[in-house]
């Protein structure tokens, strides 16, 4: 849901469950409202909210420590707020950190892709790293699509070589042959493409999780600089 923390992929925001508890609803009433939830989901939402509060408090304390002793309380508060950034940007930056935490720990594909997308907006190096990982996901998916297409259009899936036999490329051929190249087709391409696609996806996903964990650990809390104004 656009960067909003949800429970178990049910598209039920954690904030909704916590707000219902704050309004005095019992766990039984919440479960009646959302039949897909369990007691453990509600408890997990509370733990999530507690972790969020502690993390934000930690960032505020760090900002206060950096400001130091200022005789004028109003000026001190202004400097602290400037250090943290606009409230919406602080929330967006923290939401991104939560998504990256989930991606690094659980490896959920949607969280990993969302983390890569937002990380790509933070700098040139991050952009090219995320772009390379997206290319890996795309190529792995393309190999699997080739394997699926082979039984559907057997005469149009294969690989191209030069007349001397040098490999050029493989894939789906629509329509006709490429000029100056020889087209080969065989059902062996199905297991080869499936295996190659799955290995490439697994390798890319593993590298993505490692890179996200590294990127998350090296980031500095600078929401006013690194996070754009648009919603996650």
Image (cartoon, grey):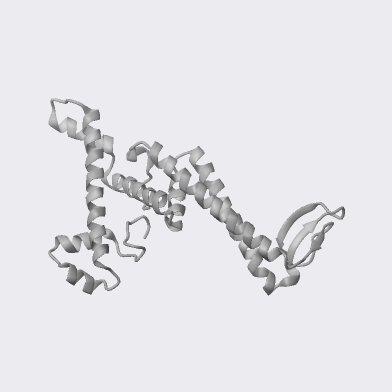
Please report the residue visible at 34 percent of the width from the left and 37 percent of the height from the top. 222
Q: Quadrant of the N terminus?
A: bottom left
Quadrant in which residue 199 is drawn: bottom right
Count of numbered circles on the image: 0
Please report the residue visible at 29 percent of the width from the left and 44 percent of the height from the top. 90
Residue nearest the viewer, comparing 207 with 94: 207
In the rendered view, tell whether residue 79 sits above or below residue 206.
above
Relative to 10, 208 lies left or right: right
Please report the residue visible at 24 percent of the width from the left and 54 percent of the height from the top. 47
Percent across and percent down for residue 191 are 67, 64
Percent across and percent down for residue 57 are 21, 42
In the rendered view, tell whether residue 177 sits above or below residue 215.
below
**Could one spot residue 120 in this view of the protein?**
no
Relative to 62, 109 lies left or right: right
Percent across and percent down for residue 204 are 54, 50
**Could one spot residue 87 in this view of the protein?**
yes
Relative to 44, 187 lies left or right: right
Percent across and percent down for residue 15 are 25, 58
């Amino acid at each position: 849901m656009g960067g909003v923390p949800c429970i178990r992929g049910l598209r039920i925001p954690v904030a909704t469950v916590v707000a219902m508890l704050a309004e005095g609803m019992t766990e039984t009433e919440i479960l009646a409202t959302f039949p897909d939830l369990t007691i453990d989901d509600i408890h997990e939402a509370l733990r999530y909210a507690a972790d969020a509060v502690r993390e934000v408090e930690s960032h505020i304390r760090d900002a206060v420590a950096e400001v130091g002793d200022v005789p004028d309380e109003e000026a001190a508060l202004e400097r602290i707020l400037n250090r943290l950034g606009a409230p919406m940007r602080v929330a967006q930056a923290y939401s991104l950190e939560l998504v990256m935490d989930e991606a690094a720990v659980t490896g959920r594909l949607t969280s990993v892709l969302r983390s890569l997308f937002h990380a790509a907006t933070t700098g040139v190096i991050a952009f090219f790293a995320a772009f390379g990982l997206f290319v890996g996901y795309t190529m792995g998916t393309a190999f699997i699509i080739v394997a699926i297409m082979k039984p559907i259009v057997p005469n149009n899936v294969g690989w191209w070589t030069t007349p001397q036999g040098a490999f050029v490329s493989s894939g789906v051929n629509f329509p006709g042959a490429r000029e100056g190249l020889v087209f080969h087709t065989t059902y062996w391409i199905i297991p080869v493409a499936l295996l190659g696609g799955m290995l490439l996806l697994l390798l890319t996903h593993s590298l993505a999780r490692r890179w996200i964990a590294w990127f998350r650990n090296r980031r500095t809390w600078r929401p006013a600089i690194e996070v754009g104004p648009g919603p996650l």
